[in-house]
């Protein structure tokens, strides 16, 4: 009898060890998914978060993580479903609810379900603190719905709640994406009423003038930022000079940036753009290749698009088309790339429907 009990206790202990080991393994999957998301490995992150949710590990946060990964993959409406699953989880805090409603509204907006996005924005306005982020998101949804007066009112509230260069840039970008640049410029002009106090302020003011195509004032502000050791201003100065077709000074700025910051995708992408301006396409391809190892997803998108441009300018339309097809598979929402692919197909004879 005692032997039987001893065996039973040992068996229970062994089973508990297996269960604990399994929990540890599942937790590792969840933790790895977070690392994958941070590093831009969105497919791996999605797989890990879905497995974690299925295994009951951090279910709410796993659905949230899966939703974010899906958004990064351009699968916005699927992302909204994951945020909904998270919202209906157990013990969801008030702060987490707010976070999830905001994410879901953004997912609906990106997925074209504007009515659902606005419904979530209204929930945010009615049940949570109304801050800059809520007003901005509501404005973005209203703009997508062509409710221009409502959008302007919400953007005005957003700027009043946080009158910063960053807020102005965000609003300007929304209007720019809609082909309504003049409406966004008024917020840029507002931001110039802020007095510069730091190197970053001078850098931001330079960006404002750059967007307004006032390159003289942009350069003046950015040079002050560079003199205060702001390395971001070097990139912007390069953009200012390139906009004026001054590839020599632009190259000097990007070279300084690479020297001071290290092997960065942004610096090499700038150098590649200088090469394209100068017609030095072999050098452009080398700089693009040098930038790829350190590129984030957004930086990779810019590098690969410029690679397509290089091959087109070399009149190598076949390679340009191949690169463009690969690019559109990676970034299916890029309208400019889809138009570029149509153009390249017209040059190679590979029109839709042809073998």
Image (spheres, helix red, strand yellow):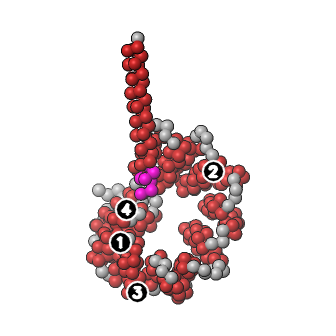
Q: Secondary structure at mark 1?
A: loop
Q: Is residue 339 visible?
A: no
Dot label at residue 95: 2
Residue to which mark 3 is pinned: 249
Image vertical order of residue 53 relative to residue 95, above or below:
above
Q: Residues within 10 Å of mark 1 (few under 14, many from 20)?
A: some
* Viewer-nearest of discs 4 and 1: 1
Residue furthest front as drawn = 2
Residue to which mark 4 is pinned: 327
Residue 189 picture location, percent across and down: 63, 79
Report, in whole angstroms, how far the alpha carbon at label 3 lies from the one at label 2.
Answer: 48 Å
Report, in whole angstroms, how far the alpha carbon at label 4 lies from the one at label 1.
Answer: 23 Å
Q: Residues within 10 Å of mark 2 (few under 14, many from 20)?
A: few
Residue 207 picture location, percent across and down: 53, 78
Considering the whole magenta stretch, tell me its main secondary structure.
Answer: helix
**Residue at 41% in and 63% down:** 296
* Viewer-nearest of discs 3 and 4: 3
Residue to which mark 1 is pinned: 263
Report, in whole angstroms, how far the alpha carbon at label 1 lies from the one at label 3.
Answer: 20 Å
Say left or right for 18 vs 147. Answer: left
Report, in whole angstroms, how far the alpha carbon at label 4 lies from the one at label 2.
Answer: 38 Å
Report, in whole angstroms, how far the alpha carbon at label 1 lies from the one at label 2.
Answer: 39 Å
**Residue at 49% in and 78% down:** 230
Say left or right for 15 vs 318. Answer: right
**Are the residues tagged 3 and 4 within 8 Å (C-beta)?**
no
Residue 262 picture location, percent across and down: 37, 73
Q: Nearer the viewer, residue 116 or 202?
A: 202
**Residue at 61% in and 43% down:** 92
Q: Which range is magenta?
A: 33-39
First-in-chain label (3 vs 4): 3
């Amino acid at each position: 009898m005692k032997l039987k009990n001893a065996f039973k206790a040992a068996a229970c202990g062994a089973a508990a060890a297996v269960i604990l080991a399994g929990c540890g393994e599942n937790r590792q999957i969840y933790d790895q998914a977070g690392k994958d998301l941070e590093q831009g490995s969105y497919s791996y992150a999605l797989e890990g978060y879905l497995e974690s949710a299925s295994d009951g590990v951090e279910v709410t946060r796993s659905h949230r993580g899966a939703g974010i990964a899906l958004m990064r993959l351009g699968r916005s409406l699927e992302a909204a479903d994951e945020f909904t699953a998270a919202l209906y989880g157990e013990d969801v805090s008030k702060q987490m609810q707010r976070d999830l409603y905001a994410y879901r509204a953004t997912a609906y907006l990106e997925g074209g379900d504007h009515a659902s996005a606005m419904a979530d924005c209204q929930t945010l306005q009615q049940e949570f603190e109304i801050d800059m982020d809520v007003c901005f998101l509501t404005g973005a949804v209203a703009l997508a719905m062509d409710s221009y007066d409502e959008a302007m009112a919400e953007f005005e509230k957003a700027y009043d709640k946080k009158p910063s260069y960053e807020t102005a840039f965000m609003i300007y970008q929304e209007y720019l994406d809609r082909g309504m640049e003049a409406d966004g410029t008024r917020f840029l002009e507002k931001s110039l009423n802020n007095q510069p106090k730091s190197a970053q302020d001078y850098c931001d003011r330079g960006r404002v003038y750059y967007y307004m195509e006032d390159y003289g004032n942009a350069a003046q502000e950015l040079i002050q930022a560079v003199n205060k050791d702001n390395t971001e201003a070097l990139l912007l100065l390069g953009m200012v000079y390139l906009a004026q077709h001054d590839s020599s000074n632009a190259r000097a700025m990007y070279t300084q940036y690479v020297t001071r910051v290290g092997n960065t995708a942004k610096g090499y992408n700038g150098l590649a753009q200088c090469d394209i301006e100068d017609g030095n396409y072999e050098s452009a391809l080398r700089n693009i290749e040098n930038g790829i190892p350190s590129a984030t997803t957004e930086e990779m998108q810019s590098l690969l698009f410029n690679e397509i441009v290089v091959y087109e300018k070399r009149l190598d339309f076949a390679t340009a088309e191949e690169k463009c097809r690969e690019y559109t598979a990676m970034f299916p929402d890029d309208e400019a790339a889809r138009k570029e692919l149509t153009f390249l197909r017209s040059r190679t004879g590979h029109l839709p429907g042809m073998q």
